[in-house]
Amino acid sequence: MEVALTGTAPLADVLTVHGGTPLHGSIRVRGAKNLVSKAMVAALLGDGPSTLYDVPNIRDVEVVRGLLELHGVRVTDGAADGELVLDPGNAESANVDQINVHAGSSRIPILFCGPLLHRLGHAFIPDLGGCHIGPRPIDFHMQALREFGAIVDKTPGGLHLTAPNGLHGTKFKLPYPSVGATEQVLLTAVRAEGVTELRNAAVEPEIIDLICVLQKMGAIIKVHTDRVIEVEGVPRLGGYTHRPIPDRIEAASWAAAALATGGDVSVRGARQADMMTFLNVYRSVGGAFAIDDSSEGGIRFWHPGGELRATALETDVHPGFMTDWQQPLVVALTQARGLSIVHETVYEQRLGYTEALNKMGATIQVYRECLGGTPCRFGRRNFRHSAVIAGPSKLHAADLVIPDLRAGFSHLIAALAAEGTSRVYGVNLINRGYEDFESKLSALGAHVER
Ligand code: EPU
């Protein structure tokens, strides 16, 4: 995507990147964005305060904090850096106009449904935001909530939910193992009356970590084989104290940046167990890594020299290759010799960013067909969801506009790998999910300025 240079993007939202310098050094990742935000919502279900450690300073956390505070939850910073204390003792209904201030800023508000219904008997959910990577419907969420006994009223401003007869355990099979819908069911089932059985559930590490949070609060949740989760509802839950799993998406993003720029980056806090699939691919394309088993832990990622190798990969639900790892890795694949094939099976429109890479000199073609071993849901629906990347390509600088969070970080990586000076517009979007990314870039020796 090319920017009209006469446009009015605020200067503070533009990053100038002088590319061509390999990233070298060490940075740290904190709690996973996609767990922390959900654990914060879970605090609403408890009778007492909860404490969450290692919370990153990112926009999504701010949005959830704001929404919790509007609902009377007292959120305070604890003594340790990144410690958050959430006290739902005075939870109350929030003013719809105030809630609407958060409309369009994140997808997390949808997960307030169950906790608010349990706590207050009703809920108002503003229109959702998040990345523009496909239609991102919420039909599974709504179906599941109705199964529990909720009544959902869609209005132009958002969703109004009530549960006049309470919420009751149910048997429900997800049409696809959606992360959000699984979390919706968990956050509703834990205090619903009776037993809930969820089939075809998502089992991402962030979901298992949310189950750990809920278990600490007093929930009874069994994770069976074959994506079946069984929840025995309990009438009351307490608070929790929890240190979240590290952010494996951020870790993989820095790993890809190390590879694409020919650098060497240690990601302190990254955990091997959550990244096995990524590590296999990283190694097979010619990247090197070493696991640090010290108490802080971490993974060092580097380009060992020589040529990178092309690969074929499909994104998938856990334990497959995460869709959020796809965009950063593709930038590195532009530097691999041969034809790489990427089949995106989780989101139908997550390859739009390749256009910008092509403008920088990459050779990437996108296809409507499923170019992978498994035909996916998007194959017959006219979505360009497969890509062939021919490399290696010399990337050159360009002016870029960031379309969404993960693609945005990929644009940054491409600008860092390219020869010359790029301007990246809309970088504030990256703050949604990457804490202090500018300081981290500087710490790794990148030449960037606002
Ligand atoms: N889907 C439906 N109907 C629904 C829900 C989902 O059709 O009601 C479809 C989606 O359209 C998509 C697929 O199911 O095609 C998977 O969506 P899922 O519900 O799993 O995604 P999500 O919960 O909205 C979370 C992460 C995403 C991550 C996905 C997949 C959060 C806040 N977001 O989204 O992360 O890509 O799971 O792992 O947890 C990101 O961090 O940048 C990000 C987009």
Image (cartoon, rainbow, N blue to C red):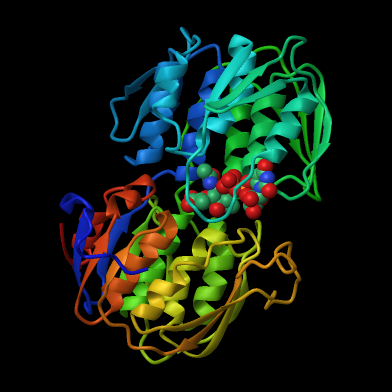
Which part of the image, by quadrant, shows the N terminus?
Answer: bottom left
Is 306 or 326 nearer to us in this picture?
326
Q: Is residue 312 left or right of residue 41?
A: right
Q: Position of residue 74 (x, y in %)?
A: 39, 15
Q: Is residue 433 left or right of residue 154?
A: left
Residue 187 in view of the camera: yes
Residue at point 58%, 18% (across, down): 123
Residue 292 in view of the camera: no
Q: Is residue 332 left or right of residue 8?
A: right
Q: Is residue 46 left or right of residue 396?
A: right
Is 176 or 264 nearer to us in this picture?
176
Query: In the rendered view, would you say 439 is above or below 160?
Result: below
Residue at point 63%, 59% (across, down): 346
Q: Position of residue 378 (x, y in %)?
A: 70, 64
Instruction: Answer with the quarter of the image where residue 114 lies.
Output: top right
Q: Position of residue 317 (x, y in %)?
A: 66, 57
Instruction: Answer with the quarter of the image where residue 16 lies.
Output: bottom left
Which part of the image, by quadrant, shows the C terminus?
Answer: bottom left
Query: In the rendered view, would you say 403 is above or below 162?
Result: below
Residue at point 53%, 86% (across, down): 310
Residue at point 57%, 60% (across, down): 322
Is 180 or 254 nearer to us in this picture?
180
